[in-house]
Amino acid sequence: MEVTKGKETKIVLTKPFQLEAESDLEPSYRAPHLLHRLLSLLKNVRPGSDLTNFQLPPVFNFPKSQLQCYGESVYCTSSNLLSQCNSGQSPLDRFTSVVAWSISTTRPTSFGVAPYNSTLGETHHVSKGNLNVLVEQVSLNPPVSALHATDEKENIEMIWCQQPVPKFRGTSIEAQVHGKRLLKLQNHGETYEMNSPHLSIRILPVPGIDWVGNVNIRCPETGLVAEISYRSSHSFLGFGGSRKLIKGKILDSSLLKVLFEVDGHWDKIVRVKDTNSGEVRVIYDAKEAISGLKTPIIKDVERIHSPPLQRWISTSNSE
């Protein structure tokens, strides 16, 4: 992220969103008197209003572009989940690994602060090992971001198109994420289609932020389908309850048969239970996948200043 003070331009990078997101966020990027200021901003906004063009004061932003957030969910992982998707021996093994990879793109965020809105034509490009990721802001009104990524070694391709639509609900803000994600395993001739969960920002009675909604993953070539629900349950007045829940199932659509039941927490452990044998196994461990991530480093500073504005970076553990 470029920050200009007078004639001096400073490049500022922050750690990727990860399990330690709240504790790692630098105090200087936390909004002061958070709840009071947020309520004052929304006092004239009616419930149901579209907040797509709503401008946050800079004090509520931290030095990270929205495009960078999208890209980080793909290239910032501690384990190579993409490789596991490709190495599965059977279509069901590969599909289950794709479900785990999809869950890994769900990252914790910090309440009350947000990344900067991307400008039209802005790009974010990262190379990590054999993985190349390019994200571009292709539309400004409505705001639409497109992502294309390839892994040359694994022969994998990703294509995303996302449009966030935030709406004010009175005591919360729900950012619906429209669009489709495609993951192609070229070696197996399989394409996986999926959507994204929505982001729920709860203001009252207890401030908080959660991913909610239904994610459907399907592979037309194999007929396998996953129906995953992101949930948060709260007890009286919003206190207690269980957050970051995942419930769902994996089924064979051609036979209308449920093969696995999915259960867990996207920020902890997610398990599947074989409906035939009753066997339970872990398919996703958030601590292994999205913990201890390092701040990216810049390898070519000059390209950052080239028009149109681009973010060319490489993660610190890249070869």
Image (cartoon, helix red, strand yellow):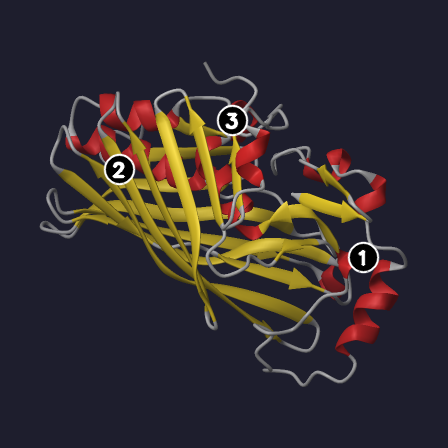
**In front of the other: 77 or 230:** 77
**Which x, y percent locates residue 161?**
36, 56
**Which x, y percent locates residue 232?**
58, 55
Horizontal arrangement in the rendering, residue 271 relative to residue 209 (left or right): left
Query: What residue type is disc 2 on?
Result: Glu
Residue 314: assigned label = 3
> Which residue is label 2 attached to?
157
**In front of the other: 208 or 166:** 166
Give SS at disc 2: strand
**In the depicted structure, whether residue 296 falls above or below residue 142:** above
Residue sitting at 59 percent across and 28 percent down?
296
Query: What residue type is disc 3 on?
Result: Ser
Query: Can residue 280 be seen here?
Result: no
**In the depicted structure, whether residue 51 falls above or below residue 228:** below
Mark in the foreground, 2 or 3? 3
Residue sitting at 68 percent across and 33 percent down?
20
**In the depicted structure, whether residue 16 falls above or below residue 307:** above
Task: Return the disc, 2 or 3, that comes first in the chain's sequence.
Answer: 2
Crowdedness of circle 1 by 10 Å Cα count: few (<14), some, many (20+)?
few
Task: Return the disc, 3 or 1, that comes first in the chain's sequence.
Answer: 1
> Which residue is label 1 attached to?
59
Q: What is the distance, in whole Å, between disc 2 and disc 3 at their CAs? A: 19 Å
Horizontal arrangement in the rendering, residue 40 relative to residue 222 (left or right): right
Q: What is the distance, in whole Å, between disc 2 and disc 1 at their CAs? A: 37 Å
Crowdedness of circle 3 by 10 Å Cα count: few (<14), some, many (20+)?
many
Task: Return the disc, 2 or 1, that comes first in the chain's sequence.
Answer: 1
**In front of the other: 120 or 221:** 120
